[in-house]
Image (cartoon, rainbow, N blue to C red):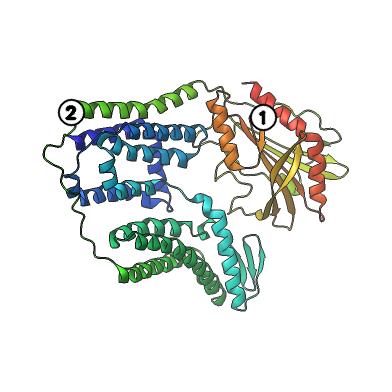
Amino acid sequence: MAGPALLVVLLTILALFRETASEMASIWWRSDTYAHGMIVPPITVWLVWRVRAGLVALTPRSSYLAVFLLGGAGFGWLVGQVAAVNALSQFALVAMLVLAVPALVGWQVARWLAFPLLFLFFAVPFGDFTQPKLMEWTADATVAGLRLSGIPVYREGQHLVIPSGNWAVVEACSGVRYLIASITVGTLYAYLTYRSLSRRLLFFLVSIIVPVLANWGRAYMIVMLGHLSGNRLAVGVDHLVYGWVFFGVVILAMFWIGARWREDDTLPQGPVRVPVTASRPSPAALLAAGSVTVLVAGLWPLVLWQLDHAAVHEVKSLASLGPIAGWQDGDATGPYDWQPRFAGADALRQAVFARDGRRVGLFVAYYRNQDQQRKLVSSTNVLVASGDPVWAKVAGGVREISLNRQPVRIRTAELRGLESARLLVWQWYWINGRWTSSEAIAKVYTALSRLSGHGDDSAVVILFAQQDGPGEADATLADFVAVAAEAIGSALQQTADGR
């Protein structure tokens, strides 16, 4: 009786959160990085089936503490939705599915199924945030390997120049695909191959370290093959094929070596059987626990519907900046025709201002009624795409400036164009009257604003100036901000107030 009741509850939760579940599935289908997510649910079912004998000895007992925790996971899902953080909503959905087990059949059963339930979290597409750091490490390792091989290298950002040609460490070179695949498969392998916790944790650690080191070797190998073959090998499609073949060999070697210390595992037979007189939950008790679990889970889509129902109309245009003291309209010629890649904005404004022969470019993208597909902070909203044919980001950092007499840390970047033109870029976010350059804090501000009933009006503000000499662009941008920050903030606030 408990099994069918649990299945009904799980299916009901999936139906209530079908949009989040379908978003996960669509990512599995279209992304090579997260394609493994398609096999995680079937593997979880197999892992449960594998230990089914032990479940017979357990007495299902509903836990309302688990229902309370499930409600907390539901709130996490709501925060992820209002802040447009896909991963948070998806982790919360999986957590609700996992907590539904102890909620209906108790913690003893949940402990017996601990690994299968926790393995389900690998279905969440998560890990893109590691790409920038992995790309940086890969470039560092490749440069070190080339120099040890006696090949001179000039590096600027993630772009490498060697005597035989130019190379760039892009997202595909980060190794995040290898890392995520290795951790997922390595965790399952450790569980099935070892019984001691120490060996399982050690192999899990190895499954993290090995793919990172292997990716460094892969990047170095590809550049060396290209260099030694006069760029006839390891370019184009071969680049990816060689990489996956190399990775496959490394992972197989890792498993082969790990098998030398395997601990022959017999399937767990379960705890000592309970006395026959032990009480089993009645159908009425299961119905009550299942109903409460579904009601608690279903509360959060209802709250989200209410917040969405109160959403205001879309922004048609930004409020006028008005005159900027000492600055006039300038020409968007030369490098000043550059535009950042921010998609899905309700309103855009790009302008150039001139003063005493100096020019500053201004770009503002304004967002309202954001969702998982159209949002301000996104991995696809960047200054320069990795495959941009004209511009490349070669440096980045942070600095502190004063915005309306408030100290604010902003992000800086240096861009290089095809014809050696260089731009210094300053970037920060405006979230309903608050300034920040942190993507995480911007998400928090957005969630707080929506949950408090003030909407999610947000914008990115980007200033840029040509680098003609050391410090000149920095001084130009600082002079412009000193007189334009208040006008920019007022225009954004007027746009928000016009809801």
Residue under numbered circle 1: 433
User: 492 or 205: nearer the eye?
Assistant: 205
Task: Nearest to the eye among marks 1 and 2: give it.
Answer: 2
Along the polypeptide, which appears first: circle 1 or circle 2? Answer: 2
Q: Is residue 220 above or below residue 319?
A: below
Q: CA distance from mark 1 to mark 2?
A: 54 Å
Horizontal and vertical percent position of residue 52:
19, 48
Residue under numbered circle 2: 283
User: 220 or 337: nearer the eye?
Assistant: 220
Position of residue 384 in the picture relative to residue 112 (left or right): right
- Where residue 161 is drawn, which disc sits there? none
Q: In this figure, what is the number of numbered marks? A: 2
Horizontal and vertical percent position of residue 206:
42, 64
SS under mark 1: loop
Residue at the image point whose x is 59% and y is 33% from the top = 445
Callout 1, which amino acid? Gly
SS under mark 2: helix
